[in-house]
Image (cartoon, grey):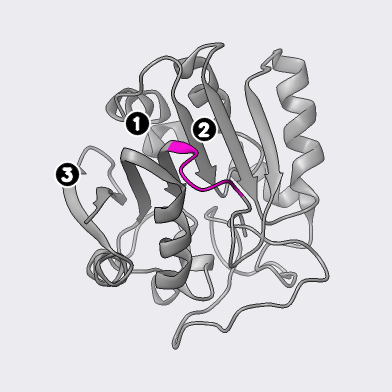
């Protein structure tokens, strides 16, 4: 999982019907750990950094569509090995800041090493929890969640935590797989449908203000606090 959790913490209650599973890669047959990630770190990394991911995740276009401004602060919840973090950091420029939040303790050293090799200095890796991103309130202009929401054990409650992170005028963007069969992504029964996410977001105090439709297998929703 790439949402937010430290080992040894008390876990939140799981949403009715929610099921943990591996990262958004391909298939669900690996042995999974407590956070729903494959126990095999190399397998997890191979899925996150698969060169073929660019064909359907369209990262460059996604970052452009976020309309970031130099100097802003962005949090990616479920940052993993930094597939999007590195691009976010470059888009924000040296005066910008990225909080790279992840639940998986094994992932943060990997992320830190990749940032070091890429000479990216404006990213702060954060080990959060599955019920709290461990970031300051009103610290972010954008909170980005990609292929991660289905890992949250209590979705609306976590979304309320994310709402508290936003500065005035801030946005939440959620990208996740449609609730139908696609060539990549988790099994359909483990996905969160667009309508379900929007219902949770409304309960958490968000309103839909936009939607990006260029991703072939995922919905991309832009929300602001009500």
Q: Secondary structure at mark 3?
A: strand
Up/down of 96 relative to 144, above or below = above
Question: Residues in magenta?
Answer: 135-140
Q: 149 or 98, which lies in front?
A: 98
Specify the label residue 27 is tagged with: none
Q: 31 or 155, which lies in front?
A: 155
Across and down, in percent, residue 134 comes to: 63, 53
Is residue 31 in view from this perspective?
A: yes
The quadrant where residue 59 appears: top left
Up/down of 58 relative to 146, above or below = above
Q: Secondary structure at mark 1?
A: helix
Across and down, in percent, residue 70 comes to: 41, 14
Residue at 21% x, 56% y: name it: 226
Screen quadrant of the N terminus: bottom right
Q: Is residue 191 left or right of residue 1?
A: left
The quadrant where residue 123 appears: top right
Q: Nearer the viewer, mark 3 or mark 1?
A: 3
In the image, is residue 58 part of the stretch drawn in magenta? no
Specify the label residue 84 is tagged with: 2
Residue at the disc numbered 1: 62
Is residue 184 in view from this perspective?
A: no
Asked if the residue at tag 2 contacts the one at tag 3, i.e. Cβ–Cβ closer than 8 Å, the answer is no
Q: Secondary structure at mark 2?
A: loop
Q: CA distance from mark 2 to mark 1?
A: 9 Å
Residue at the disc numbered 3: 210
Residue at 30% x, 68% y: name it: 193
């Amino acid at each position: 999982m790439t949402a937010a959790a430290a080992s040894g913490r008390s876990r939140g209650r799981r949403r009715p019907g929610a099921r943990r599973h591996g990262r958004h890669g391909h298939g669900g047959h690996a042995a999974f750990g407590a956070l729903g990630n494959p126990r095999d770190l190399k397998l997890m990394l191979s899925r996150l950094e698969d060169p073929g991911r660019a064909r359907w995740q369209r990262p460059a276009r996604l970052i452009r569509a976020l309309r970031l401004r130099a100097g802003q602060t962005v949090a990616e919840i479920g940052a993993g090995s930094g597939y999007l973090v590195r691009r976010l950091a470059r888009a924000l420029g040296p005066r910008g800041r990225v909080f790279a939040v992840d639940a998986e303790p094994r992932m943060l050293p990997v992320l830190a090493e990749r940032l070091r090799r890429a000479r990216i200095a404006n990213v702060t890796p954060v080990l959060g929890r599955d019920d709290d991103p461990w970031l300051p309130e009103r610290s972010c202009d954008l909170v980005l969640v990609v292929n991660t929401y289905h890992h949250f054990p209590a979705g609306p409650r976590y979304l309320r935590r994310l709402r508290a992170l936003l500065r005035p005028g801030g946005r939440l963007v959620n990208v996740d797989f449609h609730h139908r069969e696609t060539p990549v992504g988790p099994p359909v029964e483990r996905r969160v449908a667009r309508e379900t996410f929007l219902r949770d977001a409304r309960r958490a105090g968000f309103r839909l203000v936009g939607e990006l439709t260029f991703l072939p297998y995922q919905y991309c929703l832009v929300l602001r606090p009500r």
